[in-house]
Amino acid sequence: MEIKPNLWGSFRVAFKTALIGALILLMLIPTFFIQDLVRERRDRQRDAVSEINSRWAAPQTVTGPVIGIPYMDVNTDNGNKVEVKRWAYFLPSRLDIHTRLAPEKRYRGIYQVIVYTTELDIRGSFDSLHLEELSLSPANLLWKDATIFFDISDLQGLKEDMKLHLATAGFATANSAGSVAILTPQTADLDLAPASRSTEQFKTALGATLPAWMQSAAKNKLEFSATVKLKGSGNLSFVPAGRETSVQATSAWPDPSFTGSALPDTHTIKDSGFVADWKVLALNRKFPQQWKEGNYDLESSAFGVSLIVPVDVYQQTTRSVKYAILIILLTFTAFLLIEWVYDRIIHSVQYALVGLALCIFYALLLSLSEYLGFNGAYTIAALATIGLIAWYVGSLLRSGRMSLFITLLLVVQYGFVFTLIQLQDYALLMGSIGLFITLAIVMYFSRKIKWDQKQGGQPSAEPAPVTP
């Protein structure tokens, strides 16, 4: 018998499709709450990191050494000449730093923080001071107050006294006590105007008054060396203070992130750790080799390395939640195809229950990942969700074949999303290809559906040909 077009059947198909579309949009509301929960847990992790940093040491930035020499300048105030103490700063011509970072994992409750200890081997030299370039006369310099500064951003990380070994060409340093400067925290010159305080440029730096024979450095090269044992968290950076600054960093941590104003010239990253080398010239930074009066933001030119977890559980969970709309859409589309192709009726409430199960997957993922890590949590949460929905579909449709179909569909979906999360560089490419293939499959299975015909109140597929 010929099946005639039925307007009610077509309207019912459109109405059911619109209703399921509205349900899909409603299912986004729980995902928004889950994203807020992820942000809240991430904030708690950051609070734990800050607490450990305050007790261990913060990320470290190393600057120096830098020579500071005060001089007397004359200002005119209401016609009166007033002598003012100001400072001139001189950077080393060569600065070589070798460091090996020993990473450690520290915990605050369930939260993990990466900290490190390191030993800095610092060597370099100052060329003779070119005072004429700053229009300074040696007679105006206060040599007795000349200071060598070394800035460490968090002094809590120092594990022993900071000792700087000094030697200058042409001067006998047989007296070892005279060739070692012990650096201590500087205090502000409260009796001076703010513009002339020595600590305005290096207000948190360590410093030591240079020995009396320092005056010879104005005409000779001053060499220095130091070994600094330091603690820090996450990041270690260096300010390129030398006219030529060379840094080599090594560590057993396999996941470095190179940060700051310069990337390493060469680096090797293996599962056993990394080695990175930088060479930065004065031309590559934003401050001069020597200056007076003004202050410069030296840390804006810093570079270094961070010891990171490539993708933490909260970032991975956030990325997975962004695919929730895709999982729900494909699952509901499969249910619609089952209704239309196999003439089954699934109530909108049953769609909503399946959608809520798909949303609860992300709550399970977040809670489990804080204890088991992302991969293990994803596997357990996916298996639990797939098992629940497969059981529900089997009971609802009373068909083991349909239950198996939905199970395979969810396994492919969750496996595909997991793969995308692991692929940091190729996620967009693989995701686009996956969506294209998915659309092609849906088009293939829906090609024989008669959208304007009705069979049992639902659109029907083309009847199979009758063979004699």
Image (tube, grey):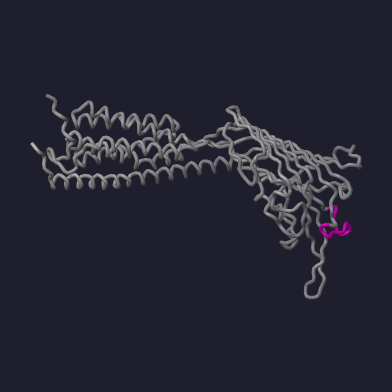
Q: Residue furthest front?
A: 468
4 or 149: nearer the viewer: 4
Instruction: Please tell me whether residue 196 is drawn above or below residue 1 in the rendered image.
Output: below
Quarter holding the N terminus is top left
Is 407 magenta? The answer is no
Q: Does residue 136 belong to the magenta stretch? A: yes
Question: What is the x, y in percent for residue 416?
Answer: 39, 33
Residue 328 place in picture, x, y as percent? 31, 40
Q: Position of residue 439 (x, y in %)?
A: 33, 39
* Depicted 283 relative to depicted 392: above or below: below
Classify residue 5 by image quadrant: top left
In the image, 272: left or right of 211? Answer: left
In the rendered view, does 437 fall on the left or right side of 238? left
Q: Nearer the viewer, residue 68 or 310?
A: 310
Q: What residue span does the magenta drawing correspond to?
A: 133-144
Q: Residue at x 39, y 29 (%)?
A: 379
Give the residue displayed 31% in from the left and 35% down from the top. Answer: 441
Q: Is residue 267 visible?
A: yes
- Residue at figure coordinates x 46%, y 34% from the top left: 422
Q: How many numbered circles does the render carry? A: 0
Q: Is residue 140 left or right of residue 436?
A: right
Q: Position of residue 286 (x, y in %)?
A: 69, 53
Quadrant of the drawing holding the C terminus: top left
Judging depth in this view, the residue of 242 and 53 nearest the camera is: 242
**Picture layout, residue 245 above or below residue 395:** below
Q: Is residue 385 above or below residue 145?
A: above
Q: Residue at x 64, y 42 (%)?
A: 263
